[in-house]
Image (tube, rainbow, N blue to C red):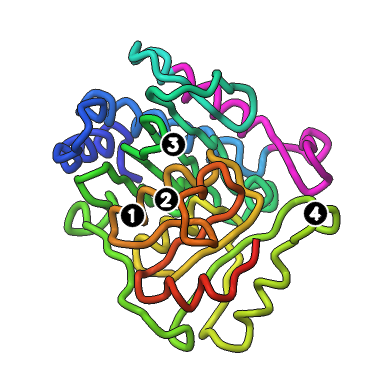
Amino acid sequence: MTDGLDLAETASVILRGAVDPAVDEATVRAAVAAVVSAGELHLDLLGQIPPAEVGRKSSRRDLVTAADVGAERLVVERLRALGDGAAIEAEEETSDEVADGLRWFLDPLDGTVNFVHGIPMFSVSLALYRGPEPLFGVVHAPRLGETFVAARGAGCWLLETPGGPSRLSVSATSELSESILATGFPYRRGELANSNLENFGRFFNDVRGLRRLGSAALDLAYVAAGRLDGFWELHLSPFDVAAGALLVREAGGVVEDFRGGGRWLRGGEILACAPGLRAPMASRLQG
């Protein structure tokens, strides 16, 4: 496993082209080192949390563990230490007042259900925004040994590759019949007006494959890497998509809501895909 400080230093160098001064080398180093440390906590606790200590939130499917809470506290402490005055919005405990300045979005363990069941598709997702604009994002998958980073104007990168960091691009796919798409389903399915099952059915017969990975942050990272051709989902929170959306944008992809607008961060619906799939995907999606 690559040392977290090495990854942080590498990220700070390759993202020097970031257009916003808030994304300086010290900030990138601190953010990447923090999510890698959170990932180490996940691995320490993987398979070690008794079922009786797994909590529930909005539904019996919406789980929370000591790994979620501990990782959030670790990353929040590191971010506060930067002293930049940025607000923080995280999944478990931290939610500063919404304002137009700098704001961190943190999902300390995206894919908690996977984590509880020992499935390796889970991640830490962290992004820095200025108002509605994404500036920096990192998605770290500790069990898979992969860290995806992006900054506005500096591209999207996978840090752990044999020849050094690799710049990523979305796929060139333009035909649904040649595409692999991913999506997810809400915890409170059966209670909400749209469970996404109808959207799933609209693609079912016409695509090469459909995947349900269980971590929206990794779904988006995989679109950025060209492994998936597109992703859509409903009922997500800002911390689920904030980092991954920037990865896709900086890799040349499209990120929008189902009507082609910009309400994907807080509007509860997101479409992210290769440019050639924008029209055929959007035409089938209903929010």
Task: State the residue in front, 194 or 123.
Answer: 194
Name the kind of residue labelled 2 in the image.
Answer: Ala
**Residue 101: percent from the left, percent from the top?**
39, 22
Magenta stretch contains residue 160: no
Assess whether mark 2 and mark 4 are in contact (beta carbons under 8 angstroms). Answer: no
- The C terminus - image quarter: bottom right
Rounded to the nearest whole Å, what is the CA distance between mark 1 and mark 3?
16 Å
Label whose residue precedes the other's in the sequence (1 or 3): 3
Tell me how far mark 4 sits from mark 1, CA to CA: 30 Å
**Front position among marks 3 and 2:** 2
Q: Is residue 95 above or below residue 134?
A: above
**CB atoms of marks 1 and 2 within 8 Å:** yes
- Pointers 3 and 2 in contact (CB under 8 A)? no
Q: Distance of mark 4 from mark 3, alpha carbons?
A: 28 Å
The image quadrant where one finds the N terminus is top left
Question: What mark, if any, has residue 249 been given in the picture?
Answer: 1
User: Is the residue marked by circle 2 packed among few (<14), some (14-19), or many (20+) residues within 10 Å?
Assistant: many
Q: Residue at x 66, y 71 (%)?
A: 199
Q: Which residues are magenta?
A: 49-77
Residue at position x 51%, y 85% from top? 208
Q: Nearer the viewer, residue 104 or 81?
A: 104
Give the label on residue 281, or none.
none
Q: What's the amino acid at mark 1? A: Arg
* Distance CA(mark 1)–CA(mark 2): 6 Å
